[in-house]
């Protein structure tokens, strides 16, 4: 993220687009813990203390359908994206941000998004079409698009079978909506999580802005002791080979479908307000009253207690506030996926009661998944 930020900043300056380039990111955004990434972040709990260290970035509304003030639909027992009633006001708000900057003669250098789903924000998925339209707005205003695919990359959001009507097996969230970003920030899944390795990809145009004769000093001066670490690169290559195999693709597709089917059982719990799944990422938002979307009081520690009950049953996961996160590793079997969801159901029953017992399926191993 730091590399994308610095490249976008400096290339905007070099092109004469802006003397002091500005950035736009989403409400509740999280892009890492280094100072540049924190400046693009908007989660007070993580970021507020460091306000004095940061540069200012603007915020655009994130498309959180379940809690969107513009969504006029009453809560239903379904993913809020499916039954929302709105006029895409969230996109209108992005447009307004760009228009306001343009009016001031100080356009954005770049907009930063986590494509398809914002993770640390609480697993907030974007309704279909949001990313494509926002990318068009950014491009229309001459801004670059920085896609933070640290969480979403490498098949985590599922594999689109076609891109712009062409057969494809892309590993990236952006491509689900035919969006090609100017910067693609990758980490976690690059090595399957085995070794620390990250990469920032960009376009030839940006690359060329840092290319010149020795005496021009156009070089991008940025590096770390372990930049281009050979062991990390070898792990990334090995991981990519597995990820791109048809067996892995098939297995991921199968566990995604199993997860989708099993999550349906959780609607039986009155403590479940929203269930949102994007590929192999699921967020289950717990509420005190699903009919009103009423939140639990902080002191009730609802999310934490549910995760503790899950851990006692051998499934380790963590809550983001009161959103329970399920992100099965790709080696998870379908039996284990069923068990993960079943354990979540059992834990909801233990913590909140009043929940008709979920079907007792053949259980998988009880070791932590
Ligand atoms: C969406 C997103 N962006 C950026 C980061 C930070 O990545 P790193 O820890 O490699 O700096 C994270 C880490 O969790 C993340 O989830």
Image (cartoon, rainbow, N blue to C red):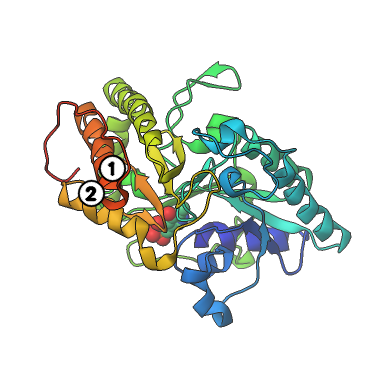
Q: Is residue 283 left or right of residue 294?
A: left
Crowd rating for badge 1 (residues with CA inside 10 Å; few <14, some 14–19, many 20+): many
Residue hosting label 2? 310
| Residue at the limit of the structure toward the bottom, as seen here | 52
* Helix, strand or loop for disc 2: helix
- The disc at residue 344 is 1
Q: Position of residue 66 (x, y in %)?
A: 56, 44
Q: Position of residue 239 (x, y in %)?
A: 28, 38
CB atoms at circles 2 and 1 under 8 Å apart?
A: yes
Q: Is residue 102 left or right of residue 135?
A: right
Q: Which quadrant is the C terminus positioned in?
A: top left
Nearer to us in this view, 39 or 205 = 39
The answer to whether residue 242 is above or below residue 272 is: above
The answer to whether residue 312 is above or below residue 358 is: below
Q: Is mark 1 within 8 Å of ligand 1?
A: no
In the image, what residue occupies the spot 11% across and 36% down? 365
* Helix, strand or loop for disc 1: helix
In the image, what residue occupies the spot 47% across and 52% down? 122
Q: Earlier in the sequence, mark 2 or mark 1?
A: 2
Nearer to us in this view, 77 or 362 = 77
- Asked whether residue 230 appears in the rendered view, the answer is no
Crowd rating for badge 2 (residues with CA inside 10 Å; few <14, some 14–19, many 20+): many
The answer to whether residue 300 is above or below residue 342 is: below
């Amino acid at each position: 993220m730091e590399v994308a930020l610095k490249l976008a900043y400096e290339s905007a300056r070099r092109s004469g687009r802006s003397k002091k380039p500005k950035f736009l990111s989403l409400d509740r955004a999280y892009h890492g813990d280094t100072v540049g990434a924190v400046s693009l972040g908007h989660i007070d709990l993580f970021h507020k203390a460091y306000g004095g260290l940061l540069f200012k970035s603007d915020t655009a509304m994130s498309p959180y359908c379940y809690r969107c003030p513009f969504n006029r639909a009453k809560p239903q027992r379904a993913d809020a994206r499916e039954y929302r009633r709105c006029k895409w006001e969230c996109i209108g708000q992005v447009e307004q941000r760009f228009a306001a900057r343009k009016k001031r003669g100080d356009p954005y250098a770049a907009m930063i998004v986590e494509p398809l789903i914002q993770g640390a924000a609480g697993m907030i998925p974007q309704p279909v079409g949001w990313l494509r339209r926002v990318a068009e707005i950014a491009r229309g205003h001459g801004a670059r698009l920085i896609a933070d695919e640290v969480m979403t990359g490498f098949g985590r959001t599922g594999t689109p079978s076609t891109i712009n009507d062409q057969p494809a097996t892309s590993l990236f969230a952006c491509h689900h909506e035919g969006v090609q970003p100017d910067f693609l920030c990758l980490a976690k899944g690059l090595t399957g999580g085995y070794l620390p390795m990250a990469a920032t990809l960009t376009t030839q145009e940006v690359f060329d802005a840092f290319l010149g004769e020795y005496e021009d000093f156009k070089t991008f001066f940025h590096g770390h002791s372990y930049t281009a670490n050979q062991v990390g690169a070898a792990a990334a290559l090995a991981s990519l080979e597995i990820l791109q195999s048809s067996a892995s693709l098939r297995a991921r597709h199968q566990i995604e479908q199993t997860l989708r089917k099993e999550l349906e059982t959780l609607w039986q719990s009155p403590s479940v307000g929203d269930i949102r799944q994007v590929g192999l990422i699921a967020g289950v938002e717990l509420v005190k009253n699903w009919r009103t979307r009423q939140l639990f009081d902080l002191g009730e520690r609802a999310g934490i207690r549910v995760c503790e009950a899950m851990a006692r049953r051998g499934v380790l996961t963590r809550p983001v506030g009161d959103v329970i996160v399920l992100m099965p590793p790709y080696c998870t079997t379908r039996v284990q996926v069923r068990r993960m969801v079943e354990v979540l159901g059992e834990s909801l029953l233990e913590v909140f009661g009043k929940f008709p017992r979920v079907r007792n399926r053949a259980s998988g191993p009880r070791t932590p998944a």
